[in-house]
Amino acid sequence: MGIWSWFFPSADDRVATAKKRMEAGRWADARLEVLELDHPEAAGIVSACEAELAKMNLEAAISWCRAGDDPRTSHHLEVAETFRQPGLEDAFREARREMRAIRQERTVAEQRKKEEEQARLMSADPLGLTGGPSWRDPTLPADFLDAHDDEAAARLALVVEGYDASLRASVGDLGAPFARALLDFEDGRADLALQALLALPDDVPVVRFERARAAYALGDPAAAGRELRTFAKLLGRHANMGRHHTGSFLALCLTEAGDPAEGLRVMRSVRADAPDEGGPLFAQLLEMNGALDEAEKVLLGLARAYPKDTGVHMLLARVQLAKGDRVKAMTVLERSLQACACAPGSCGARPPDLNVVRTLATLYLEDRKETDRGLELAQQAGALIQAPTWDDAYLQALAADRGGHPDARRMAEGLWEHTPPGSPAQERLERFLPA
């Protein structure tokens, strides 16, 4: 099935797509593709997919039962029942039997754990006065966290060790509420983390930083930016905090909040003290603010330093295209493909980047340069596509036109019909595929 068929699929096309998704184990996608479709094979495909989905949810229910998560266990059992098909009775019986055994083992283990905990507490010497075993960490307050939770302690240590060295000592003074907030954030509960952090002192830099992380995770870059400004004011500077440099983080938040000019100003200030900080973000901000020559210079340096970073090459090509240097952009993208070309099983081999392949093929075919190479890349792009876009249909139509395909005119007309009038996409059609 060609790319064009993804946009205007027939019933046979959709059945073929569903079968491919079944071969790939994508049962839910295959089912949705033909659900309520009027085709003689549709009902059989739906039935087969629902049987597999029922089995998958039974397996998931067993896994969550083993993990002790009863709500998720129940959820997956309900979903499995929704997809239940004739012939799965034994599978359901076996799953329920296994879960009963797991719960029985868990009950016994919990009772044993309670008994061991009681024995341990009876023999412990928290203050170390009698020479008995002491489980209290003398470097933290007594209420900082559950003294027995070694996993939580290790997770907290990883976060705190990433803080600027001058701030690590302040963490212990914040006690258990701060520790709980960090763990909530690491567990994906930024909402709970932010509630706890708002109750902590406002004049502690690490609190402000963690508030910024939580606010950003909750989709509020403006609030995150305010917290980061306060962090820098309290500390007197920006700092490296784990994987974040707070200056770069602030620039990102300002940009996402709608002020890329201020984001660029902040990044320039950051790079005055740390010239290598935030290179890709700096280049993006330069591009967004129209400083294309400076962006190209920065990106050329990054491309030399990271020859296999396809994101850097794509951004560099985009800047060069904005400057009208199409040949330079083609050269950069070819170099990116060559740098990342590895034999399977060697040097971190990975599939070619669809954006690079698609963009390069489009440029070759638009400019009628290296047409054979453009057609080859267009075919390669087609094999990489998962969810086709307008750009994919445009490339397919270009390839049909430049390759002399008999359906070229029909494909171009269909693309014109589905392209909004007056849009940049229509401008490309007028230039390279006129009606």
Image: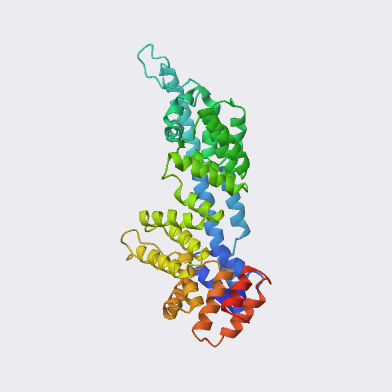
Camera-nearest residue between 305 and 62: 305
Location of the C terminus (image quadrant): bottom right
Camera-nearest residue between 333 and 167: 333
User: Which image quadrant for residue 180?
Assistant: top right
x then y, percent, for residue 381: 47, 71
x then y, percent, for residue 417: 67, 77
Q: Check the image and report above or below for 353 versus 222.
A: below
Residue at image location 61% in from the left, 70% down from the top: 425
* Residue 41 visible here: no
x then y, percent, for residue 359: 49, 68
User: Which image quadrant for residue 373?
Assistant: bottom left
Q: Residue furthest top?
A: 129
Left or right for 299, reference 214: left
Q: Check the image and report above or below for 169 versus 89.
A: above
x then y, percent, for residue 312: 44, 57
Q: How many marks?
A: 0
Left or right for 159, reference 89: left
* Residue 142 visible here: yes
Q: Residue furthest left?
A: 346
Q: How is the image coloured?
A: rainbow
Camera-nearest residue between 104 and 227: 227
Q: Residue furthest bottom?
A: 406
